Image (tube, grey):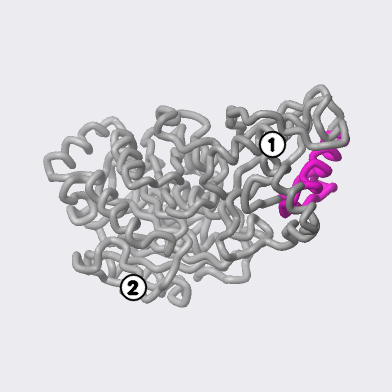
């Protein structure tokens, strides 16, 4: 019986926080049951045939995908790979150019997988879970490319996934060779090791890990300079491509790689990056890093791991500022927030039902200096109404975009776009003063006071 995807079928995201229940999977998939029955009810992570069937059975059950894999190429663990795809989805969802007006699951998104491998698992998972996603994939290994092509066509996804067998001459991010102008993201599972000796040492360190079996070929596992050099080359290429890709990302096999990569980004004046920790409770931990040469800001829970994260200096600045309103009525605070932002010459759209709103500005319009300038303009018959924007432009004039949400006991201010840290902190400080019980808005005017640096806090969703 075919399990090929129906593009109109609903998708339910699987949760792999807990280990896969083998007994349950055996009841759901005859092929997996056969493996268990032939081995007296046992499953061995040291047996490549067992591990391969586990991957195939999970993909069939949870994603309705069929897969063919060679014995001498990597067999991808589904929970780990799906965690990376989910992180990418959150990253893209929280940095949409229309600031979330279009339902994220309905957005047209283009991704590039650098080194799809024989499984082509990332494009397959991405397309299985998001019906409007399309992928371009590359691989330098001819055998892996051929198997990947088979897996794409056998699942009827060749109209959404396009593959290219590349060479060293193409580079790692060959947008022109792929014949695409722009993409929403790139992703990559790079070769982790710099030599066979390094690979053997790395695998032996995981000897006590139940997932220790490795069927990967050297072309998938080893590269000159290891993953540090590989991702470093990707960063250099991305710097040349700039905003043609919204987010460049890569999996990292070693936590020690993270500070080297962050330092490299800082050297190139990249001010917008994100760090993720996949399956933090799993035995094998994997890190992901994303960077952008644009200024759409990801949500805190995407860019800053809540648990088990790295040193704070390796994380990007928080994008969420929390204002304590516990001593005030939620409805009154909502009214103050809306009125405060409504009278400023900036774009502001408020939803009273959800007590949240989205706004943007092309500069400082709340400080004393800005108010004096505006007053001078009014005296020259340039009214405030004429300077207040009514729509969201697409010409790059937005210097700060934000979302404000009033919740029980606190209000959250999220930075959606912008690279001016001082402007962001000034805006948050102004709102904090307005939300105070004796704030300027309650007195009938906006009172900004002297500029003060504010602490932007991290609050988990």
Whole-percent x and y of residue 331?
Answer: 87, 36
68 and 377: which one is in front? 377
**Secondary element at tag 1:** strand
Q: Is residue 203 above or below residue 68?
A: above
Q: Is residue 186 left or right of residue 219?
A: right
Q: Which residues are magenta?
A: 331-358
- Neighbours of disc 1 within 10 Å: few (<14), some (14-19), many (20+): some
* Quadrant of res 68: bottom left
Q: Residue 42 at what x, y percent from top left? A: 38, 40
Can you identify the residue that label 2 sits on?
Answer: 176
- Residue 292 showing in the rendered view: yes
Check the picture and name the quadrant holding the C terminus: top right
Foreground residue among 8 and 430: 430
- 307 to 219, vertically: above or below: above
Going 44% across and 44% down the picture, which residue do you hit?
A: 271
Write the residue at 75% across / 61% down.
390
The residue most toward the top is: 327
From mark 2 to mark 1, how far is it between C-alphas? 41 Å
Looking at the image, do the residues carrying marks 2 and 1 touch, with CB atoms under 8 Å apart? no
- Tell me the residue that label 1 is attached to: 412
Is residue 428 within the magenta segment? Answer: no
Q: What residue lies at 44% left-to-right and 52% top-to-bottom?
A: 292
């Amino acid at each position: 019986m075919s399990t090929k995807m129906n593009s109109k079928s609903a998708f339910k995201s699987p949760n792999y926080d807990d280990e896969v229940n083998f007994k349950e999977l055996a009841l759901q998939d005859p092929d997996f049951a056969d493996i268990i029955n032939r081995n007296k009810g046992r499953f061995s992570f040291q047996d490549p045939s067992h591990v391969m069937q586990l991957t195939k059975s999970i993909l069939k059950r949870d994603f309705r995908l069929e897969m063919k894999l060679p014995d001498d190429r990597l067999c991808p663990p589904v929970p780990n790979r799906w965690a990376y795809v989910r992180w990418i989805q959150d990253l893209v969802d929280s940095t949409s150019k229309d600031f979330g007006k279009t339902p994220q699951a309905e957005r047209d998104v283009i991704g590039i997988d650098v080194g799809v491998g024989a499984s082509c698992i990332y494009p397959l998972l991405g397309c299985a879970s998001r019906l409007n996603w399309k992928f371009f994939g590359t691989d330098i290994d001819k055998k892996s490319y051929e198997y990947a092509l088979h897996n794409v066509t056998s699942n009827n996804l060749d109209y959404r996934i396009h593959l290219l067998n590349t060479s060293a001459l193409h580079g790692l991010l060959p947008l022109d060779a792929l014949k695409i102008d722009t993409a929403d993201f790139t992703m990559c599972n790079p070769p982790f090791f710099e030599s066979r000796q390094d690979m053997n040492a790395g695998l032996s360190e995981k000897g006590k890990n139940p997932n220790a079996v490795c069927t990967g070929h050297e072309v998938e596992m080893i590269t000159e300079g290891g993953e540090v050099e590989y991702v470093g080359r990707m960063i250099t290429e991305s710097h040349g491509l700039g905003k043609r890709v919204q987010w460049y990302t890569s999996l990292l096999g070693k936590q020690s790689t993270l500070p080297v990569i962050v330092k490299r980004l800082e050297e190139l004046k990249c001010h917008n990056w994100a760090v993720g920790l996949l399956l933090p409770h799993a035995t094998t931990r994997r890190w992901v890093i994303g960077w952008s040469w644009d200024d759409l800001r990801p949500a805190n829970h995407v860019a800053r791991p809540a648990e088990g994260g790295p040193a704070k200096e390796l994380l990007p600045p928080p994008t969420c500022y929390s204002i304590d309103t516990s001593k005030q009525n939620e409805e009154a605070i909502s009214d103050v927030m809306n009125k405060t932002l409504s009278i400023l010459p900036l774009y502001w759209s408020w939803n009273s039902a959800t007590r949240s709103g989205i706004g943007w500005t092309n500069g400082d319009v709340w400080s004393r200096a800005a108010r004096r300038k505006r007053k001078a303009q009014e005296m020259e018959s340039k009214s405030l109404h004429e300077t207040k924007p009514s729509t969201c432009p697409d010409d790059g004039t937005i210097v700060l975009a934000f979302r404000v949400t009033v919740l029980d006991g606190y209000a959250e201010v999220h930075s959606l776009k912008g690279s001016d840290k001082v402007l962001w902190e000034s805006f948050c400080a102004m709102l904090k003063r307005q939300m105070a019980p004796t704030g300027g808005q309650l007195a009938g005017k906006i009172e900004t006071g002297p500029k003060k640096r504010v602490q932007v806090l991290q609050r988990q969703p």
